[in-house]
Each structure stands twice: as C-alpha cells, then as structure tokens.
Amino acid sequence: MKRYQLIILGLSFLLSSCASVSYFGDRYMPVKSDVEIYYSVHDVKKLYKVIGRLTSPNYDEDRLKAELKNYARTVGGNAVVINKPDVTNDGQSVSVTADVLRYADE
C-alpha cells in the first residue's frame, strides 16, 4: 500500500510542476506582431479592450514573461498587463494573473 501511495504522490508532484498557463476570455485570430508587456494599464497609450485573463504559476521572470506573451499571441492579444501576484501567508508567490489586451485598431 505504501508503494502505491508513493507512486501517486510522485505523479501528483510531477503534474503540478508541469502546470501551465490557464486562460479565461475571448479568442481572436492570433497576432503576428510582438506582444507588449506592461505592469499598469496606465502605461498603455493605445485604445484597447481587455479580452481575457491569464493565470500562470510564478516561474522565474523571463520564463513567466515568455509564456504570457506566447499565450496572449495565440488568443489574439496585443499586450499583457501583469497584475499583482497571489501570495501565501509566508510570502511565497504562488501564481500571477495578467490581463490580455487587444488594441482597437487591430
């Protein structure tokens, strides 16, 4: 029985470490241009519409940005606004959410 529990625990750990970006929102044709990254909607100088929200495990910064940009591109987003990360009581960041923007002129 312990061996079975160990296998289940190992598989659970493996699957949780492979967690990827999840998305809730509208989908458009993928964009060909580079997706821009912002940390505040106040920095966006173009007219836009929020088309959805991405949630991702908090990887290192470069990997996180790359995954958010790639996913936003596939759902038709021109930009991503990274929001405040969800943090546990001990200060460990658990996940990051980001709004996906589509520019009005697209």
Image: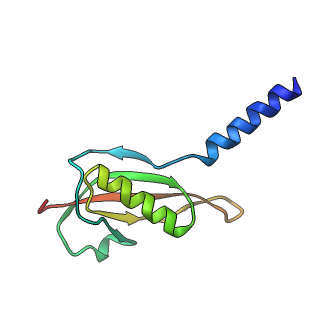
Query: Is 67 rendered above or below residue 8?
Result: below
The answer to whether residue 75 is left or right of residue 55 is left
Query: Is 98 rendered above or below residue 45?
Result: above
**Measuring 20% from the left and 63% from the top, which residue is drawn there?**
48
**Measuring 26% from the left and 45% from the top, which residue is drawn there?**
27
User: Farthest residue toward the front?
Assistant: 32
User: Farthest residue toward the left?
Assistant: 105
Please say which color scheme the image uses. Answer: rainbow
**Measuring 37% from the left and 57% from the top, which residue is drawn there?**
70
- State which quarter of the image contains the N terminus: top right
Q: Quadrant of residue 9?
A: top right
The answer to whether residue 101 is left or right of residue 62 is left
Residue 101 locus on image (x, y percent): 27, 60
- State which quarter of the image contains the C terminus: bottom left
Residue 54 locus on image (x, y percent): 41, 52
User: Farthest residue toward the top?
Assistant: 1
**Measuring 77% from the left and 32% from the top, which residue is drawn there?**
7
Q: Quadrant of residue 72?
A: bottom left
The answer to whether residue 45 is left or right of residue 92 is left
Residue 53 locus on image (x, y percent): 37, 52
**Viewer-side residue, 1 vs 85:** 1
Query: Is 39 rendered above or below residue 70?
Result: below
How many labels sit on residues?
0
Residue 26 locus on image (x, y percent): 27, 45
Query: Is 65 rendered above or below residue 74?
Result: below
